[in-house]
Image: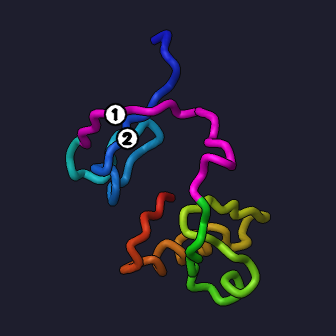
Amino acid sequence: TGRIAQIPVSEAYLGRVINALAKPIDGRGEISASESRLIESPAPGIISRRSVYEPLQTGLIAIDSMIPVGRGQRELIIGDRQTGKTAVATDTILNQKGQNVICVY
């Protein structure tokens, strides 16, 4: 196409299941988006980011007591295979119900 890869963005994507090309695969119809962003773009500089003041409780006592996670932060979950990385991520997402938090996985 001669263009840099972009992905559509919209609040209509929240709660939907999409594939790697941002096409819906949940059987709930198309998603309309009026804006798109580059797939790869530089992250904002540390100075221009908003400060994190509010903690995000994962609901997992071992993590909450050792690793302070702030609302709005990205957090790397790293480990060998079969060590529970997906379980940590999904449990954390499930524990955000009713907390006015948007989780993207």
In magenta segment, residue 21: no
Point out residue 60 in the picture as x, y percentages from the top left corner. Answer: 62, 85
Q: Which residues are magenta?
A: 31-50
In the picture, measured across the screen, residue 41 lies left or right of residue 25, that is right
Q: Which residue is tagged 2?
A: 9
Considering depth in this image, is 23 or 81 the residue closer to the camera? 23
In the picture, measured across the screen, residue 90 lies left or right of residue 46, that is left
Q: Residue at x 73, y 72 (%)?
A: 83
Q: How is the image coloured?
A: rainbow
32, above or below 59, in the image: above
Q: Residue at x 65, y 72 (%)?
A: 69
Q: Amino acid at mark 1?
A: Glu
In magenta segment, residue 40: yes
Q: Which residue is tagged 1?
A: 35
Question: Outermost residue toward the left?
Answer: 29
65, above or below 9, in the image: below
Q: Secondary structure at mark 2?
A: strand
Q: Amino acid at mark 2?
A: Val
Considering depth in this image, is 65 or 16 the residue closer to the camera? 65
Disc nearer the start of the sequence (1/2): 2
Q: Secondary structure at mark 1?
A: strand
Q: Residues within 10 Å of mark 1 (few under 14, many from 20)?
A: few
Q: Quadrant of the N terminus?
A: top left
